[in-house]
Amino acid sequence: MADMTGPVCLDEWVTVTAAYDPDVRWNGFLRPRMDREAVETVMTAFREYDGETDPKTPTHRWDGDVLLVTEYDGDDEFTETLHPDADGLYPLGARAWVWSENA
């Protein structure tokens, strides 16, 4: 199936518009691709999150059009480098976060 564009929700917590193929999933969850504005919306929501379940929420920075997302697991940190695809979209959390269609 071809990509759809519509609202996607991260763990029923923040919703953004993104492109996704409903048949391509990671552990049953969507693998959305989104524009820079949507990335900023998601990362702002993380900064505003109260942190009850995560000891430290993900952070990000831009290096031109390259997105660097750092996640934390206890004392360890992992940085993922995301390049925009041909449509200028980023697969933010596409293989690790709980994304679903927002009905």
Image (spheres, helix red, strand yellow):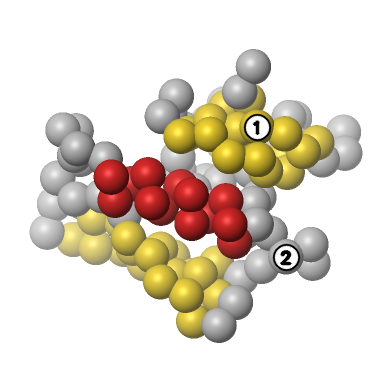
* Image quarter of residue 17: top right
Question: Mark 1 — residue?
Answer: 7
For the C terminus, the image quarter is top right
Residue occupying the point 53% across, 34% down? 15
State the CA–CA distance, disc 2 to disc 1.
18 Å
**Quarter of the image that includes the N terminus:** top right
From the viewer's side, name the closer residue of 96 and 8: 8
- The percent position of residue 86, horizontal first and vertical second, equals 79, 67
At numbered mark 2, what does the secondary structure look like: helix, strand or loop? loop
Task: Name the residue at 72% across, 34% down.
Answer: 6
Percent x, y for residue 9? 53, 30
On the image, numbered disc 2 is attached to which residue?
A: 88
Which numbered marker is on residue 33?
Answer: none
Q: Quadrant of residue 79?
A: bottom left
Tell me the residue at 57%/51% (across/down): 38
Residue sticking out furthest to the right:
2
Q: Residues within 10 Å of mark 1 (few under 14, many from 20)?
A: some
Few, some or many C-alpha atoms within 10 Å of disc 2 (few <14, some 14-19, many ≥20)?
Answer: few
Check disc 1 and give the amino acid type: Pro
Q: Is residue 6 above or below residue 94?
A: above
Whether residue 99 can be seen here: no
46 versus 85 height, above or below: above
* Tag 2 near tag 1, CB within 8 Å: no
Q: How many marks?
A: 2
First in sequence: mark 2 vs mark 1: 1
Percent x, y of residue 29 = 56, 30
Amino acid on which the number 2 mark rests in the picture: Gly
Q: Nearer the viewer, residue 97 or 41?
A: 41
